[in-house]
C-alpha cells in the first residue's frame, strides 16, 4: 500500500503564479484534508472533504480551492500564490464511517512550498 | 472551536531517562479522541498513541503512555527509557466525534520539540 501520496515534495513559485498540489490515497478513506504547517503554529486545517463531491472550509481557507471528484484524489489549488502561502502542506486521510471514526488520520510526507 | 495547548515549546531528556510532555485542551464535547503525533526531521507525521475520551484506562504503546485526566482536560505523554530516535517535534491533537458539525478535523497544538542527549 502506498498510503497517502503527495506531489511534488518541493516547489518554488513566483508571486501570482498558480499551481496544484496533488494528493492521492489508496485506502478507500472517505475523509481527506489539507493542512498547512508554519513555524510555531502547529498544523492548521485549510479544507476538508467527507466524500466525493463534498468539500468544506477549514480554519485558513483563503487563497485555496479544492475539489473531490473521486474518493482517491483531493488536489489543492493555489490560484494566485502569495508569499504568505510559503509553508509546508500536508494531506491526510481517514475513515469516517460509523464505527471507524476513531481511526487516526494518515498523513502524506508533505510538500514544502516557497513563494518568492 | 476546540483549542489545544502545549505549554512546553522545548524539552530535553537524557538517554534512558523518562520525560513527560504536557497537553491541555478545551472542549464542550463529551465524546472525542486525543492523539499524539511525532514529527522527526524527515517531516513525516507519525502516530504515537491515541485515547478515546470514553475510556477511563490510559493508553499505552510500548515505551509511550498517556495520563488522561478528562475532568481537567489534560492529556500528557510519558516517554520512558528515552532513545536518541525519540528526538522530534511532538504534537498533541484533538478530534471531535463523528456527529459534530466540524467533521473529523484534527485540532493541533503548536508542538513540543524534544531533544534527547546521550
Image (cartoon, rainbow, N blue to C red):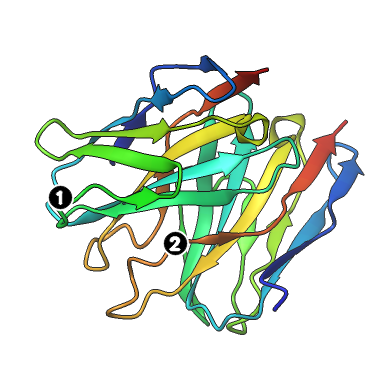
Distance between the Cα atoms at labels 2 and 1?
19 Å
Residue at figure coordinates x 75%, y 34% from the top left: A86
Residue at figure coordinates x 18%, y 34% from the top left: B73
| Residue A31 drawn at (x, y percent) | 47, 71
Q: Which type of secondary structure does the marked residue at label 1 adopt? A: loop
| Residue A106 drawn at (x, y percent) | 56, 62
Circle 1: is it few (<14), some (14-19), or many (20+) Cα within 10 Å? few
Circle 2: is it few (<14), some (14-19), or many (20+) Cα within 10 Å? many
Side of B98 relative to B118 (left or right): left
Side of A50 relative to B34 (left or right): right
Q: Which type of secondary structure does the marked residue at label 2 adopt? A: loop
Image height of B3 relative to B50, above or below: above
Residue indicated by mark 1: B29
Chain of the residue under label 2: A
Side of A80 relative to A102 (left or right): right
User: Across the whole image, how many numbered discs are drawn on residues?
Assistant: 2
Along the line of sight, the residue nearer the viewer: A97 or B69? B69
Chain of the residue under label 1: B
Image height of A100 relative to A23, above or below: below
Quarter of the image that includes the C terminus of chain A:
top right
Pointers 2 and 1 within a single chain? no
Closer to the observer: label 2 or label 1?
2
Residue indicated by mark 2: A104
Residue B93's label in the rendered image is: none
Amino acid at each position: 500500500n502506498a498510503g497517502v501520496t503527495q506531489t511534488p515534495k518541493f516547489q518554488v513559485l513566483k508571486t501570482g503564479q498558480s499551481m496544484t498540489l496533488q494528493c492521492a490515497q489508496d485506502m478507500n478513506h472517505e475523509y481527506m484534508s489539507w493542512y498547512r504547517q508554519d513555524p510555531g503554529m502547529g498544523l492548521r486545517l485549510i479544507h476538508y472533504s467527507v466524500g466525493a463531491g463534498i468539500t468544506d472550509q477549514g480554519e485558513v481557507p483563503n487563497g485555496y480551492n479544492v475539489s473531490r471528484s473521486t474518493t482517491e484524489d483531493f488536489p489543492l489549488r493555489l490560484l494566485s500564490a502569495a508569499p504568505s502561502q510559503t509553508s509546508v502542506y500536508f494531506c491526510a486521510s481517514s475513515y469516517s464511517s460509523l464505527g471507524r471514526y476513531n481511526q487516526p488520520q494518515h498523513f502524506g510526507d508533505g510538500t514544502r512550498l516557497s513563494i518568492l | 472551536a476546540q483549542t489545544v495547548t502545549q505549554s512546553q515549546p522545548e524539552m530535553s531528556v537524557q538517554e534512558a531517562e523518562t520525560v513527560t510532555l504536557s497537553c491541555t485542551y478545551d472542549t464542550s464535547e463529551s465524546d472525542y479522541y486525543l492523539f499524539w503525533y511525532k514529527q522527526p526531521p524527515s517531516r513525516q507525521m507519525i502516530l504515537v498513541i491515541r485515547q478515546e475520551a470514553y475510556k477511563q484506562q490510559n493508553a499505552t504503546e510500548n515505551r509511550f503512555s498517556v495520563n488522561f485526566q478528562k475532568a481537567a482536560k489534560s492529556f500528557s505523554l510519558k516517554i520512558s527509557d528515552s532513545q536518541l530516535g525519540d528526538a522530534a517535534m511532538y504534537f498533541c491533537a484533538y478530534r471531535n466525534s463523528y456527529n459534530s458539525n466540524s467533521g473529523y478535523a484534527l485540532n493541533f497544538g503548536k508542538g513540543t520539540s524534544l531533544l534527547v542527549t546521550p
